[in-house]
Every structure is written in structure tokens, then in C-alpha cells.
Image: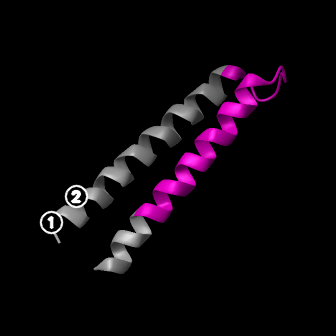
Amino acid sequence: MSGVIFLFFVISLLLFIGAFHYFKLLQQSASYPPKKIVKQKVNVLASAGVITLLIGIMLIYFQ
């Protein structure tokens, strides 16, 4: 069970790293990819990161 919990935290970390990467890309004045798509990617990755982090915390709590 601890391996599954660890996996959820690693996935959460990777999703937050991806969101941070796209957030930094959003701050640049590059024209490709469009800012609307980059904002969507940041929102999706950050939301998925929060969900997996909450699942990991719930698994620790109910263990």
C-alpha cells in the first residue's frame, strides 16, 4: 500500500512540475503555442496535481 501512496505523490509532483513549466512558458512573449492553450494546460496539470495529491493524503489518512 505504501508503494501506491508513493506513486500518487510522485505523479502529483510531476504534474506540478509540468504546470510550473507551462506557467513559466506563459510568462514569456513567445507566440507559439498560443497563450490560451498554455493557460488550459496549466489549469489541467495543476488541477490533476491537486487531485492526485488529495488522493495520496486520503490514502495516508485511511491507511
Q: 10 Å neighbourhood of mark 1: few (<14), some, or many (≥20)?
A: few
Q: Left or right of 38: which side holds 15?
A: left
Give the image location of residue 19, x and y in percent. 59, 40
What's the residue at 45%, 47% (across, down)?
A: 49
What's the residue at 80%, 24% (across, down)?
A: 28
Find disc 1 in the rendering and name its residue.
62
Nearest to the observer: residue 63 or residue 38: 63
Q: CA distance from mark 2 to mark 1?
A: 6 Å
Q: Which mark is residue 36?
A: none
The region drawn magenta spans: 9-35
Q: Provide the secondary structure element on which disc 1 rests.
A: loop
Q: Provide the secondary structure element on which disc 2 rests.
A: helix
Find disc 2 in the rendering and name its residue.
58
The quarter of the picture where residue 27 lies is top right
Quadrant in the picture for the C terminus: bottom left
Give the image location of residue 26, x and y in percent. 71, 26
Say what amino acid the circle numbered 2 marks: Met
